[in-house]
Image (tube, rainbow, N blue to C red):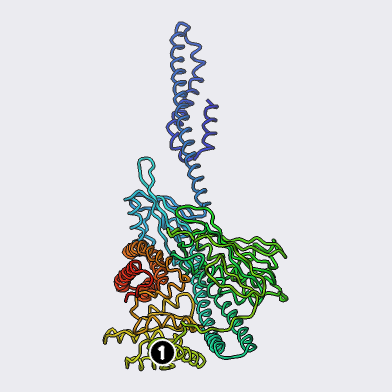
């Protein structure tokens, strides 16, 4: 019996005293009664032995009954004790598990909460208390309305209801303004189920650092954009400030070179012009690189003559080659197609840069342009242009650098050759824009081969006729610029004397030109050029003076500088166009400006100008531009002579190109219409750019001007319907003119 009591007391020592005392009190009372009864039994035991042995059996039975009763009570008490002892052990395990869960939640770095369907907070960790800035007593069993601001509580109810109704996780961004500094958090919540009941589990994530980083990134982007705008503005101003005096230098030099001067004076002025051209090339390189970096260059696909492209390039570089005594040649195999579709302007720019570099780095020998045809796929041929020279070469360890911007093979202060380091970088990026590749093979002292390959589309025009073998001229043989043989060869010798240019004859009838120019040198140059071309000039030096003179309506065309004091050329043009919209009439306005940055042309056209000339302007450019606005030829649909000149008088080729455009033009217009209707600005811009490039080949001045107006409207994000509506009938007129050309032959009078 003592052992049972000891067992009970040992159990009591390990369990909650009050709870176990309450549970075991009845059993302990019964046990005390049994202990008292057992004492009485021991006292009476001696008396019982003296009783009649006849009654032993009965006494034994009585004792056995009491013993059995005592044993039964002991067994019952033991069983109850085991039940009671087991019950507190399960509760303790549950409490241990809950304590462990609480400790884990409190160690988590994010606030976590659990709510019931009525929004009462059932569980949460210490981080949640920190975020809400409330104690456990203020949160437990309460709802968000009991301790949060009305605005926060209202937002919480909306998000909770969204999570309860959809069953999906709901995440929102919140700002906790009660902190200093305020905290930005993501609050996520999702409905979970357990034991047949539904709860809402939620947590907070501090995103203050991420939002600060995002704000810093946005600030950096805005700063970069501002820096880019500042750079563009600087380059525009630099271009204007350089081109303005360069316009005077080059223009006056050309005028003097065309006068009666001796050989020494001509040689000196030729060097002056070459130096001015070199300076202008540096400016153009910087501007071109800026345009490429800004992503403001479009690639067009128009038919062009590959052989003519190479010939024009070498003609442009012939003077530099002659000055160094270099042979300049081209090699074009007969299997290379003559007419292809691509971007001739960009191809010519790359070729000019590579040929110019080859001439610069070659002291003696030759520079040769070679064409070859490569793989064909999807109706395109890979055409490789290779420029081979006998110059100084490029070390192998430097070859990977030369296509990077501002890189120089020799960047020291003692380097022999100058340059900006942008030419090859521009070439590389232009070739990539045309879906091509560029590379170099070179060794010091053994010359270099710069080659680039671009995929050009077939047009169906016949292959070039077989070409005679190329004969390389020796120094002193003079210059052969014939476009009928296999290549252009430039040898050493004196420059030929200037000959009378039939195209430089005074314009028939002349134009009444209103010239707006504020720079004295450019005023004198422009007046001299215009008068030489047979035009009558009225000179003004401000935008306000332009408005006053234009109001009199006595001029055929206005040449408008953009940057002028008081009222600039763009504002003056807008006011003229506004006045014309109310009073009727339309005077052609041509921008003649030193602003030649990306977008400057579009801004001029957007303002209402009809055309654009970038300074420095030479007499040929000015003459060609003004021919479009001659009273007796301003309505001419096509410029046959100009088209033939661009093809070296190849009438058959011009007819083939005309037939090609009659087939491709309507398809291109349909593509443009679909892009415009779909609101696809990039596709629309590419289509009108390609269309304009084809029209230029035929000298279709009116259609070109309308295409430029449509392009300007697209770039400016303005309504395009009016410009497109004007362009469509102009295209129909071009188609009719081309049909007349094909039917009547090249000698037929030009349609009007």
In the figure, 526 relative to 745: above or below?
below
Q: Nearer the viewer, residue 79 or 427?
A: 427
Question: What residue is shown at x 36% (from left), y 91% (from top)?
Answer: 547
Question: What residue is shown at x 71% (from left), y 76% (from top)?
Answer: 413
For disc 1, the neighbor class at 10 Å (few under 14, some 14 to 19, many from 20) is some
Report the label total.
1
In the figure, 534 relative to 215: above or below?
below
The x, y position of residue 381, in whole percent, is: 49, 56
Question: What residue is shown at x 46% (from left), y 25% (from top)?
Answer: 34
Tell me where residue 517 sits by quadrant: bottom left
Q: Is residue 485 visible?
A: yes
The x, y position of residue 501, in whole percent, is: 49, 83
Query: Going by the picture, which residue comes out furthest to the top?
Result: 54
Q: Secondary structure at mark 1?
A: loop
Quarter of the figure that contains the C terminus: bottom left
Question: Which residue lies under the disc numbered 1?
Answer: 567
Q: Is residue 716 visible?
A: no
- Horizontal side of residue 491 vs 255, given as left or right: right
Tell me where residue 138 sits by quadrant: bottom left
The x, y position of residue 555, in whole percent, is: 35, 90
The x, y position of residue 679, in whole percent, is: 34, 65
């Amino acid at each position: 019996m003592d052992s049972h009591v000891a067992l009970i007391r040992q159990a009591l020592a390990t369990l909650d005293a009050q709870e176990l005392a309450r549970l075991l009190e009845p059993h302990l009372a019964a046990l005390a009664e049994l202990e008292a009864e057992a004492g009485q039994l021991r006292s009476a035991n001696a008396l019982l032995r003296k009783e009649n042995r006849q009654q032993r059996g009965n006494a034994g039975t009585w004792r056995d009954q009491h013993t059995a009763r005592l044993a039964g009570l002991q067994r019952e008490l033991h069983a109850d004790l085991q039940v009671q002892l087991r019950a507190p052990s399960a509760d303790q395990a549950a409490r241990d598990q809950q304590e462990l869960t609480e400790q884990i939640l409190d160690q988590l770095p994010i606030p976590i909460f659990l709510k019931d369907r009525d929004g009462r907070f059932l569980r949460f960790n210490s981080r949640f208390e920190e975020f809400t800035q409330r104690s456990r007593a203020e949160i437990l069993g309460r709802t968000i309305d009991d301790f949060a601001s009305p605005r926060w509580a209202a937002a919480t109810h909306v998000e909770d209801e969204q999570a309860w109704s959809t069953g999906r996780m709901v995440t929102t961004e919140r700002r906790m303004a009660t902190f200093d500094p305020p905290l930005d958090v993501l609050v996520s919540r999702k409905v979970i189920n357990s034991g047949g009941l539904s709860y809402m589990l939620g947590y907070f994530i501090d995103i203050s650092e991420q939002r600060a980083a995002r704000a810093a990134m946005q600030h950096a982007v805005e700063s970069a954009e501002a820096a880019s705008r500042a750079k563009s503005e600087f380059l525009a101003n630099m271009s204007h400030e350089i081109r303005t005096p360069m316009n005077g230098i080059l223009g006056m030099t050309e005028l003097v070179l065309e006068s009666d001067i001796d050989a020494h004076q001509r040689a000196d002025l030729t060097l002056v012009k070459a130096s001015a051209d070199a300076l202008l090339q540096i400016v153009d390189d910087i501007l071109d690189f800026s345009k490429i970096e800004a992503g403001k260059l479009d690639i067009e696909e128009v038919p062009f003559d590959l052989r003519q492209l190479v010939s024009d390039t070498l003609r442009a570089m012939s003077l530099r080659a002659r000055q160094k005594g270099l042979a300049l040649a081209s090699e074009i195999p007969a299997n290379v197609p003559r007419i292809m579709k691509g971007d001739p302007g960009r191809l010519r720019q790359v070729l000019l840069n590579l040929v110019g570099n080859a001439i610069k780095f070659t002291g003696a020998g030759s520079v040769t342009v070679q064409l070859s045809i490569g793989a064909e796929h999807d109706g395109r041929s890979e055409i490789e242009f290779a420029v081979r020279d006998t110059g100084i070469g490029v070390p192998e360890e430097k070859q990977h650098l030369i296509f990077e911007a501002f890189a120089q093979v020799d960047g020291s202060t003692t380097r022999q050759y100058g340059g900006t380091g942008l030419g090859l970088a521009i070439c590389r990026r232009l070739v990539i824009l045309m879906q091509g590749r560029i590379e170099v093979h070179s060794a010091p002292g053994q010359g270099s081969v710069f080659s680039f390959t671009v995929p050009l589309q077939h047009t169906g025009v016949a292959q070039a006729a077989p070409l005679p073998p190329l004969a390389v001229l020796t120094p002193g043989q003079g210059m052969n610029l014939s476009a009928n043989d296999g290549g252009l060869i430039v040898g050493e010798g004196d420059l030929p004397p200037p000959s009378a240019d039939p195209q430089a004859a005074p314009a028939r009838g002349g134009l009444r030109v209103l010239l707006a120019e504020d720079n004295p040198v450019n005023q004198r140059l422009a007046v001299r050029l215009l008068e030489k071309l047979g035009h009558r000039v009225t000179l003004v030096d401000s935008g306000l003076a332009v408005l006053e003179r234009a109001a009199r309506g006595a001029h055929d065309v206005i040449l408008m500088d953009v940057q002028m004091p008081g009222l600039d050329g763009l504002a003056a043009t807008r006011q003229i166009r506004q006045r014309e919209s109310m009073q009727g009439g339309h005077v052609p306005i041509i921008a003649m400006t030193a602003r030649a940055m990306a977008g400057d042309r579009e801004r001029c056209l957007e303002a209402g100008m009809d055309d654009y000339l970038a300074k420095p302007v030479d007499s040929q450019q000015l003459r060609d531009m003004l021919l479009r606005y001659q009273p007796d030829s301003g309505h001419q649909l096509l410029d046959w002579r100009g088209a033939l000149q661009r093809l070296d008088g190849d009438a058959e080729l011009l007819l083939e190109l005309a037939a090609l455009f009659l087939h491709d033009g309507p398809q291109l217009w349909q593509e443009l219409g679909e892009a415009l209707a779909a609101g696809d600005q990039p596709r629309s811009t590419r289509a009108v750019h390609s269309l304009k490039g084809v029209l230029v080949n035929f000298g279709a001045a009116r259609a070109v001007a309308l295409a430029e107006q449509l392009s300007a409207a697209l770039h400016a994000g303005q309504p395009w319907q009016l410009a497109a509506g004007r362009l469509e009938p102009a295209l129909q007129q071009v188609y009719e003119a081309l049909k007349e050309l094909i039917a009547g032959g090249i000698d037929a009078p030009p349609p009007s």
